[in-house]
Amino acid sequence: MDINLINIVKRYKQNLVLNKVNLTFKEGCLNCIMGPSGVGKTTLINLLMGLEQPDSGEIQGLEDKLIAAVFQEDRLIEHWDAISNVKLVCDKKITVNQIEQEFAKIDLSEYKNKPVHTLSGGMRRRVSIIRAMLHQSNLIIMDEPFKGFDSSLKQKVIEYVKEKTAGKTVIIVTHEIDEVRILQANLILLN
Amino acid sequence: MARKSDSVAKSVLLNRWGVRILVICFWLLFWEILYRLIDNEIFLVSPTTVLNTLWDLAGQIAFWQAIAFSFIRIVLGFLLAMVLGILLAILSYNNWIVKELINPIFKVIKATPVASFIILALLWTKASNLSILIAFLMVVPMIYTNVLQGLFARDQKLLEMAKVFRLSRWKKVKAIYFPTVMPYFYSAVSVGLGFCWKAGIAAEVIGIPSGSIGEWLYESKIYLMTNELFAWTIVIIIISILFENIVILILKHLRYRTIDSQGKNFKEE
């Protein structure tokens, strides 16, 4: 089922962040949201994740969605190692061995048993991406997931994300038009 | 290189223990000098007299029975306080009305002098149960306040993550709540442990339950047996320290299972 946002209005006190936003995210498609800072991109995905409620308007098509997310601030369990962070959100059927294979795909094997608070920003981001990829879901929401990667690593991680999200609805907030191009995603501009 | 650093560590440890033993010797010597200066066994007895008294007491069954009597009751009060303190904190965290309802009671308990409680408790309960009630009353507000503080210190962003990924309640407790609450709980337990012993024994001295440490202390005072008073005080200090160390060891193990293991224990489940 497609996700439809109908006349969504969201304000924080007097600050109107989203004003009668109408959008459709096609089921099984990759969608990128772009727009200047402060335009309400993060608010929009918070509404989709159910972390905030719109002041008015309606979101349709979320009823059957199982959501996985990559948050802007990673939101990992800091004192736990990288694998345990991923295992936390996984189905029981997914083994540690399978998770380790995912770590190898984006050059994280060396850091899999390290507590995440000792990892660099880029490594934490990759742990957060693997966590979202391995969670049983059909809607994946990602807030600037490739921020801070060098170009070759970015290419590798984007390919990994494309492979893992095939057939799922994906919504990515980004500032980089290059990422939209490599992902071959639908572009949604928020003004 | 490793062998060298090992030997350095060993010598530092030996030095530290050496200093500690010297410090103990210094204070024992100071005590002995003071005893000789005062020269009155009613006011102050010598360390050797106390040791001899302890040795004599240890040979009596009544001595061990008194220790068991007081230990069981004070520990029971402490454990009950721990369970109820945690339960009430969880209830208050989940329901603000419960929190508002409970807060004034604990404020009153905290502000009330221990002696008032002991005298009041004597009206409510048998003297033999007095130390259970007093240890409980002294510790429960500490556990409640600290655990509640820990629960409110949880990371809201991690709870949002848990909501999005639909983590089970147990996973949320283990990954998010436990690590936040444990340091608060740990500090409440360490403070509460010392406090429950002091308050529990004080209650026994006032209530004089038959066969308790408090009764022995009271009789030492009445019959001016300063040597027994000192010996029992040392016994109380030793039991209190031993109990504190055992509980802290258990808590450290719990802490490892929940925080320091870096999630390894979770992975093994």
Image: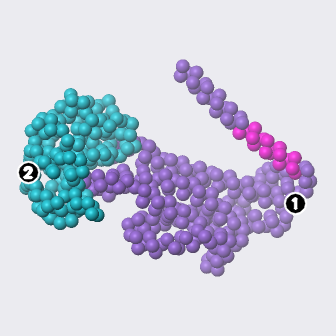
Give the label on residue B42, or none.
1
- Tell me, what hue is chain B? purple
Q: Is residue A177 left or right of residue B56?
A: left
* Comparing labels 1 and 2, the label whose residue is closer to the camera: 2
Residue B68 position within the rendered picture, expressed as x and y whole percent measured from the top left: 65, 60
Q: Which residue is mark 2?
A: A27
Q: Nearer the viewer, residue A9 or A165?
A: A9
Q: Quadrant of the N terminus of chain B?
A: top right
Q: Is residue B135 left or right of residue B144?
A: right
Name the residue at 45% across, 57% down.
Answer: B150
Spatial CA distance of label 1 from label 2 is 90 Å
Classify residue B136 by image quadrant.
bottom right
Image: magenta residue range: B20-35
Q: Chain of mark 1?
A: B
Residue B84 position within the rendered picture, expressed as x and y whole percent measured from the top left: 49, 66
Which amino acid, mark 1?
Answer: Ile
Q: Which secondary structure, mark 2?
A: loop
Name the residue at 40% across, 55% down.
Answer: B154
Q: Nearer the viewer, residue B59 or A185?
A: A185
